[in-house]
Image (cartoon, grey):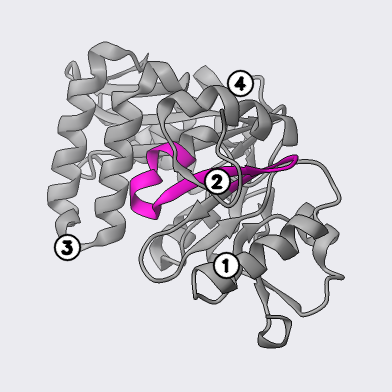
């Protein structure tokens, strides 16, 4: 039986059977709303879940600032929004807030008294046309195309579907990557390392799709994603040996061409406010940004 609000339980692999269909029925546009993302980041964000009437609720309870994702379920959601914000204020003794809410949810709750809504640009998702990422056609992709052409001229590589036989090599690659990035000194990078370990360890059970680039029969890049909705794939993980210039561009292009050729759009998630990451994502000329919002309850509404 699912936990009933206000009781929560940690997200476990066996919860996928209950949670995933409800997320899929919602047809989300924001990258957080897949079971895979909630599961692999559960330790980093302290992610737990519950059910209130018709709505699925996910609580992030890490540190001193607990928050809730938007409730997933049918409209209208004004009632559940008020319940959740007031519960956070009373039970968690923290500023009550809903994070990474989509515009659909905002449209439903914006008339609630004492609710403040603000965009969180660092969490906006980057969505691209898959044909653009696959072909890199036109002048705006000239530099990307040159990087890939140079890589083709200087390296003999093989693209392959990611399978169980590649898991050990992928983990070895991420250990090298983390060593170069000093993951142990950065909680976000450490959390990402853990999330990658989770998605590789449970690759088959999560039913995700991946690809690898091999140079001299050695895995030097890998990527993992899945369908977010009927028209969009979301890329959860993409890692490459930084010693090979242009390898990320090749991995990106090959994965779309070989796995998501029939899917119109690709969501490559957010930049978290990291300047270099934002520049890299903008350089691929997104078709649109998926806005996300923070919803808080003012002092007068508590």
Specify which label sits upstream in the sequence, 1 or 3. 1
Q: Residues within 10 Å of mark 1 (few under 14, many from 20)?
A: many
Kindly tell me whether residue 294 is visible in this rendering: no
For label 1, the residue is: 88
Which residue is disc 2 drawn over?
Answer: 32
Magenta region:
38-57
Q: Earlier in the sequence, mark 3 or mark 2?
A: 2
In percent of the image, x 81 and y 59: which residue is there? 78
Q: Which residue is mark 4?
A: 261
Q: Which residue occupies 65% across, 67% down?
A: 85
Where's residue 164, x and y in %? Answer: 28, 13
Mark 1 and mark 2 lie on one chain; the one further toward the N terminus is 2
Secondary structure beneath disc 2?
loop
Give me the C-alpha separation between circle 4 and circle 1.
43 Å
Q: Secondary structure at mark 3?
A: helix
Classed neighbour count for the residue bearing mark 2: other residues with Cα under 10 Å, few (<14), some (14–19), many (≥20): many
| Distance in Å between CA atoms under marks 3 and 2 | 25 Å
Q: CA distance from mark 1 to mark 2?
A: 21 Å
Q: Residues within 10 Å of mark 4 (few under 14, many from 20)?
A: some
Q: Sequence order check: which comes first, mark 4 or mark 3?
A: 3
How many tags in the picture? Answer: 4
**Looking at the picture, does residue 106 appear above or below residue 112?**
above
Placement of the C terminus among the 4 image quadrants: bottom right
């Amino acid at each position: 039986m699912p936990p009933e609000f206000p009781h929560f339980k940690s997200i476990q692999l066996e919860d996928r059977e209950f949670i995933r269909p409800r997320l899929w029925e919602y047809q989300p546009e924001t990258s957080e709303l897949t079971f895979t993302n909630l599961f692999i980041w559960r330790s980093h964000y302290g992610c737990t879940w519950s059910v209130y009437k018709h709505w699925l609720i996910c609580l992030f309870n890490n540190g001193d600032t607990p928050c809730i994702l938007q409730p997933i379920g049918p409209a209208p959601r004004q009632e559940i929004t008020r319940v959740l914000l007031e519960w956070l204020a009373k039970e968690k003794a923290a500023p009550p807030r809903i994070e990474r809410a989509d515009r659909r949810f905002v449209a439903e709750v914006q008339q609630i008294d004492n609710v403040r809504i603000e965009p969180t640009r660092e969490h906006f998702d980057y969505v691209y046309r898959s044909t653009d990422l696959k072909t890199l056609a036109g002048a705006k992709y000239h530099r990307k195309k040159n990087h890939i052409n140079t890589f083709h001229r200087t390296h003999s590589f093989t693209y392959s579907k990611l399978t169980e036989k590649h898991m050990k090599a992928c983990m070895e690659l991420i250990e090298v990557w983390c060593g170069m990035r000093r993951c142990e000194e950065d909680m976000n990078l450490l959390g990402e390392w853990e999330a990658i370990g989770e998605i590789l360890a449970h690759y088959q059970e999560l039913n995700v799709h991946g690809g690898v680039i091999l140079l001299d029969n050695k895995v030097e890049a890998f990527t993992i994603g899945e369908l977010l909705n009927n028209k969009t794939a979301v890329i959860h993980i993409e890692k490459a040996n930084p010693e090979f210039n242009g390898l990320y561009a090749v991995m990106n292009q090959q994965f779309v061409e070989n796995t998501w050729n029939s899917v119109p759009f690709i969501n490559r998630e957010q930049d978290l406010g990291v300047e270099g990451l934002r520049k890299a994502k903008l350089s691929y000329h997104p078709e649109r940004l998926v806005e996300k919002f923070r919803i808080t309850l003012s002092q007068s509404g508590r």
